[in-house]
Amino acid sequence: MIEHPWLIPLAPLLAFAINGLLGPRYLKKATGVIGSAGILAAFLLTVWLWAEGEYGEATLFEWLASGSLAINIGFLVDELTVVMLLVVTGVSFLVHVYSIGYMAHDGSFARFFAWLPLFVFSMVMLVMANNFLSLFVFWELVGVCSYLLIGFWHDRESANNAAMKAFLVNRVGDFGFAIAIFMIFWNFRTLEYGAVFAQVGQADPETVLVIALLLFVGAMGKSAQFPLHIWLPDAMEGPTPVSALIHAATMVTAGVYMVARMAPIFEVHTTALLVVGGVGAFTALFAATIAVVQTDIKRVLAYSTVSQLGLMFLALGAGVYTAAIFHLATHAFFKALLFLGSGSVIHAMHDEQEMTRYGGLRRKLKWTYGTFLVGGLALSAIFPLAGFWSKDEILAGAFMRGASLDGDGLFIVFWALGLAASLLTAFYTFRMVIMTFHGDPRDAELHERAHESPAVMVAPLALLAVLAMGAGAVLGFPPEHGLIHDFLHHAPGILHFELTGNQTIIAISLAVISTAVALLGALGAYMIYSRGAPRAESIGQFVPGMHSLLYRKYHIDEIVNYGIVATTKVLGFILWAIDAKIVDGIANLIGWTVRALGGAARQVQTGQVQNYVFLMALGAVVSVGALMIFR
Amino acid sequence: MADSLNAYLYVGAILFALGMLGVLVRRSLIVVLLSMELMLQGVNLTMGAFGVFNEDMGGYMLTLASLTIAASESVVGLAILVVVSRKARELYTDRMDGMKW
Amino acid sequence: MAESGFPLLSVILWVPLAGAALVLLTRGRSAAAAVAMLAALVSLLAAVAMVAEFDPGVEGYQFLEERDWIAALDISYRLGVDGISVLMVLLTAILTPIVVATSWLSINRRVREYMAAMLLLETGLLGVFMALDLVLFYVFWELVLIPMYLLIGVWGGPNRIYATIKFFIFTFIGSVLMLLAILVIAFDAGSFNVILLPEIGVSSHLQTAVFGAFFLTFAIKAPMFPFHTWLPDAHVEAPTGGSVILAGVLLKMGGYGFLRYVLPLTPEAVDEFRVAVMALSVVAIINGALVAMMQRDLKKLVAYSSVSHMGFVTLGIFSQEQIGIDGAIVQMFSHGLVTGALFLCVGIVYDRTHTRLFADLGGFAKRMPVYALLLGFFSLASLGLPMMSGFVGEFMVLLAAFGWSYVAGVLSLLGVVLAAAYMLWMYKRVVFGELRSAAFARIPDANRVEVMALLPLVALVMWVGISPGTFVNLLDTATAAIATYR
């Protein structure tokens, strides 16, 4: 299998080609099966790759050679790649199956099942890249797939704007990423991971720091970290399976993957790690506070995703890369589950996304409720579900990093931020669960028509629920030495945080603290929301303006709109005026001057032959006279 | 007096100048054409006189050639006059500014 | 293969002209288009054969043809191609049949003359890229001007006379200066032979003057900021086919001129003015992008995006890195394909709606799904999406720019970010949302001819994007040589 790693991306690519070319006209509903089959093939091939356990690099073809530059398209398969591949293809497969049911009544069914496998192809290529250019290429391609799928319902103005916003914010991130790539080339004269990592040790640490921070800007864009997080909540305009797959489970974690992959670069200068951890911790809390007051079920989940991604970056910054990847995997399971569950609810409620019109759905949507609850418990990191194991490791890692002698004390602060985020996570998760499934129906008519989703949608939910329940313990027990730790232990470039001596006790107490905090959050939500909304409103009044500030997402969108977008437009307008009036004006002025001179000169041309003759004679006389006088 | 070259040259020059004056100031195209002939004759006279006094056959030859050309030129010129007068119904130079700009 | 027995280049070059003569003898629009198509396809076939036979490893020119022309002045009819011109010849040969096919639908009057002008234009353009004698080059350079002048002036929009005269005068100012420079070179070096000239070189004291004249010519043609203002006017007024060739090939004459004449002949002057030229390129990239963003006319937006994209070409050329020069050529090729296609897309919508203002457009995705897909494809290609041709050239040029100066690199990279903004915004305003007028409710989708005309461009854009090595290999020997003139 290692000889032919390209088979893995080939399967979704073929599904894309078949569905894209033949889908709309001939295949129609069959595209769903073809798409799912392609992804399943990729998943099975990945499992085969994993079972064989042979890793290495393979070059596919020479992409470009020019002067001192030579770039190959190749594959790097190591433990990190395999984990990512398993998560990506596995979750993708379930989402594809779910979409067959979810999108069944959509007019553009075939188009959906063309773009979705294209995304999987790009994502698989992204995690298998062995050089910075391939990474960047597919980094951009997943971005464009995201653009196409967010704007999938293109007759909605809001969807178009959200798609555009997603692409542009990502371009801003990629701006940093691209600079980093160019700097890497001119400093190391290569773009291959291995060759670059081998040289970073000898390079100027300051330069490497700049490179690392610029790479991180790219990661911030893709993984929606403050202040480049603004696109992700809007991206919920896309169909819910897209939100589950791209904007929760896979694409947005590309930034986390990238930083983990580039660990040797980030490790060179501790400032880089500090920035990564700081931004992550801040975003975790920041997004969680916004999630607390949102009423659109998908927006709550979107901000929750931003927050969870922040925790992953906190882990990366603390140097516990395994924990970050571990959380990436468990998060993919439970967040995909939650999104698909919310999709099931939205489906049942006829495309209503406002939680204020939900309520009491637990009796009508039994399967959805059960699985959603599992996802919520996992997200809240309640023992022993998946989220608990990975998140606990992150917080423990951050704490230890801050407490250890050679660590940075700031990480204690980051740990506190993470802990606060955990509290809020449990709070908004249960607020969401209670508002959706408990209490009395707030919209009787909608409630009346609600119905459980078909089996093709429920089955993936059930599978994901199993993963959300068990994956954490199976992969991560005992902490620091679970399956995933041993597996990733061999991956080059991934550093490890080793527990020593009686720190085990600290670790256990940290776990107890974070569980207690999570329970506290859940309890708070129950106290406030289970007996009706009035209590929530009265608490909202407690700090004037606070609710509005949170609900308006700290006004970041407005700041960006007026600060950057409007400024750019005004600048463009001014430059246009300069271009049309001054630059072109000068050109026209020259033309006008010549015309004016000609206009003056043409007065001589009266059209009367006698005038011409007179001038001719005069000229003759003057020239002959001049000759006679001056000779 | 009669065998002085200058006398012929004076007459030639006067003829030319008179013709020139006519070309420049008269409004009637016919008169302008006549004046042009006058200029030509002034030149012919000068050339003929040089031919005689310098005993140079070239002068005679050139005069003869010039006369021939003058004849054909006036034919063409008159023909144009006829066409123009038919089109414009008048032959005044100051009304003809079709070549303006 | 220094001397090839079969005059392949002459075939490519003169078949369109012969076609132009034949077209004038036909009656009826379809007959004219058919003859024109035939001529363009024969030329394309020969061009493809040329590329297939082209040996990328050989230094110098291939398929050389040489005949005495004005023997007294040592001016010859000398043709040849090397890595720099081979893609340009191919680009010209590809775009002409596409334009002929789409013009058959969209041109309503004087089809015969239109087709003849188009073929004459092709001969002129091919000649510019093939000529290896300064005088011959100049003749072809001027030959290009006349049919383009007619295409805009006769088949153009309401303000076509202003636009075409502006186009003519701008270009002509340049070419008069170029003629002067050519004479200076000829007197100084004693030869019009482009093959020999780089070795002889131009005397140091003349280099600045020669550089100035050449620079102005090519900068107007490319067009570089601030000599670009003829371009938006010309594009807005030109018929679709004219715009395609104008953006697709005519602009490349500027870039080609820099590579073929300026870098090899006046290296000292280039060294002296390099910073200024690079700065102008960066200004062109950013200014073009920002101005493009604010346009209200779809065609003007694409025109200004051309200014921005051609900024990358000059940036790459004057980086004098081999990567940059390779990148510039790839960018020229790619820009020809992508912007040509974009103008075709603009034409498709204009033919149906008779408007190009964003205020009147919108909502075509539902009515014209195939068209929306194609426009989307080329918009993404234009904003430099990886796996498509636009990315390759820009990436290589940016790489070279970063090698020269981080400031220049970062600023030009900003142009790429802005490209995404104006292209996506354009796409949204044209294709998404609601239809603006009930009259468009029954608007037909792109028809078979239009789709067939665009599909080869789709394929080429993908080919360049996925495997740029195929194309860059053709260039490598030639650009390695150019990069040494410094």
Image (cartoon, coloured by chain):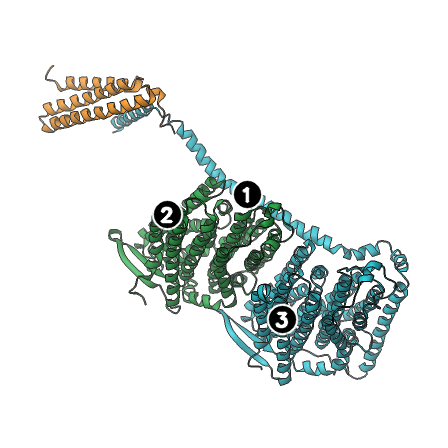
Q: In the picture, which chain is orange?
A: B
Q: Are marks 3 and 2 in contact (CB under 8 Å)?
A: no
The hue used for chain C is: green
User: Label 1, label 2: how many angstroms apart (C-alpha)?
Assistant: 43 Å
Residue carrying label 3:
A35
Residue A346 point in image, percent of width and height: 76, 63
Residue carrying label 1:
A580
- Using the image as rendered, state which of residue A428 and residue B49 is in the foreground: A428
Nearer to us: label 3 or label 2: 2
Q: Are marks 1 and 2 in contact (CB under 8 Å)?
A: no
Q: Residues within 10 Å of mark 3 (few under 14, many from 20)?
A: many
Horizontally, residue A301 falls left or right of residue C458, namely right
Q: Residue at x 52, y 51 (%)?
A: C348
Q: Residues within 10 Å of mark 2 (few under 14, many from 20)?
A: few
User: Label 1, label 3: how many angstroms apart (C-alpha)?
Assistant: 51 Å
- Using the image as rendered, state which of residue A34 and residue C183 is in the foreground: A34
Label whose residue precedes the other's in the sequence (1 or 3): 3
At label 2, which amino acid type do we have?
Arg
Residue C320 point in image, percent of width and height: 46, 61
Nearer to us: label 1 or label 3: 3
Horizontally, residue C280 falls left or right of residue B50, namely right
User: Label 3, label 2: how many angstroms apart (C-alpha)?
Assistant: 53 Å
At label 1, which amino acid type do we have?
Ala
Residue carrying label 2:
C27
Q: In the picture, which chain is cyan?
A: A
Work out whether residue A76 can be spotted: yes
